[in-house]
Amino acid sequence: MMEKTIKEQLIIYKRELQDELKNILTWWATNTPDNINGGFYGRIDNDNQVTAEAPKGSVLNARILWSFSAAYIHQPELGYLEMAERAYQYIADYFIDDEQGGVYWSVDYKGKPLDPKKQVYAISFTIYALSEYYRASKTEAAKQKAIDLFYLLVEKAYDPVKTGYFEAFTKDWKPIDDLRLSAKDANERKTMNTHLHVLEGYTNLFRIWPDKALEEHISSLLNNFFDHFIDKGTHHLVLFFDEDWNRKGDLVSYGHDIEATWLLLEAAEVIGDKGSIKKIKEITIAMADAVITGIDTDGGLWYEYEQGEDHLIKEKHWWVQAEAMVGFFNAWQISGDEKYLNIALKNWAFIKDKILDQQNGEWFWGIDESGAVMQGEDKAGIWKCPYHNSRACLEVMEKIVD
């Protein structure tokens, strides 16, 4: 039997992604709305069991808003817009702090502020989501909220001396002892993860509001990656820094490495920075090659690698695979080298085989070294959201030209 041509493979891939996008969004629309207390449930486990009184996270709600807004732009189905409107209204009513500015990290299941700290990461995702919702709905209030949050981050979180953004603050924007996004993170003042998603949020805001000051901040963030976050020797990202840009730790995050390649390019393209576009395209191939060392024989991408201890964390998380789908496809389009396309297609085959929950819907959190589904993890939760996988479907479909 003759092997399929690249064009034939891409036609099949695109069709499968269209089906999978619908599957993902149907699962979220069916299982997550909290019709008693409003908004969306804070946690659903692997077996689709709801924890009705779980806290509700700002990141989860922003990512739901982004996903359904983006889906509506791609395919204007009324149900997608209705889900986006539900998410927008809940964020506006319960997560945005009208007194001190910014966004609460979490609220309880009834919408009362639970952890009111101001995490720059969460505010960035809210900017990202509000901008996408404006693109879908043309709701002026959403656009204005996104602009207000941009000004707030520049005023409260930006480092005017060394550049970059500080990680977190108290409810009233005072210094906070615990800056971490999660227990696994280093307690440092500047992190790659937050800067990547500030860049992502600002880029989406620029699409609806091409402001000169915003453009300058996007350029500054790109330079932060060129100057600090991308290790010129290993081509991996450096994850943690103190406020003076001194490195802290040597952990490699394969998912962030490959995610950054295409998000950096997108930012440079949106602001039309030809110099940065050229630079990023060159860096992308080196970074993609560095990430290849984290790919297992089954096509799945491992989670993290501790360089100092030479310790590979042998888990394959859902979001890491989603970013590999986009990042390696992007590397193929930049370079023309089919090895990157083959990696992307093999990774998709791995996702279909191991990560998609064929029985209960959506994607598992991940699998462990033995290939078993990781137990005790969320199907929906503070971190488990429809954004990485729905976005991967949307991005790759857009990149496949019929």
Image: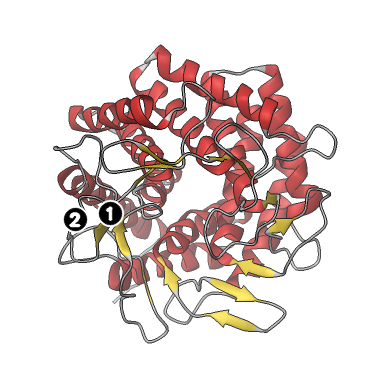
**Figure check: 117 above or below 233:** above
Badge 2: how crowded within 10 Å, few (<14), some, or many (20+)?
some
Which residue matches tag 1? 43
What distance separates the C-alpha of mark 2 from that of mark 1?
A: 6 Å
Location of the N terminus by quadrant is bottom left
CB of mark 2 within 8 Å of CB of mark 1? yes
Q: Amino acid at mark 2?
A: Val
Residue 218 is labelled as none
Location of the C terminus by quadrant is top left
- Residue 208 spot, x, y in % from top left: 51, 20
Residue 331 image-quadrant placement? bottom right
Decide if residue 272 is in sight here. no
- Residue at 64% x, 62% y is 186
Secondary structure under tag 2 reads loop
- Residue 319 spot, x, y in % from top left: 43, 59
Q: Nearer the viewer, residue 116 or 357?
A: 116
- Residue at 55% x, 20% y is 147
Secondary structure under tag 1 reads loop
Q: Earlier in the sequence, mark 2 or mark 1?
A: 1
Residue 257 image-quadrant placement? bottom right
Which residue matches tag 2? 50
Residue 119 image-quadrant placement? top right
Q: Nearer the viewer, residue 175 or 260?
A: 175
Q: Is residue 63 left or right of residue 22?
A: right
Q: Amino acid at mark 1?
A: Arg
Q: Nearer the viewer, residue 210 or 29?
A: 29
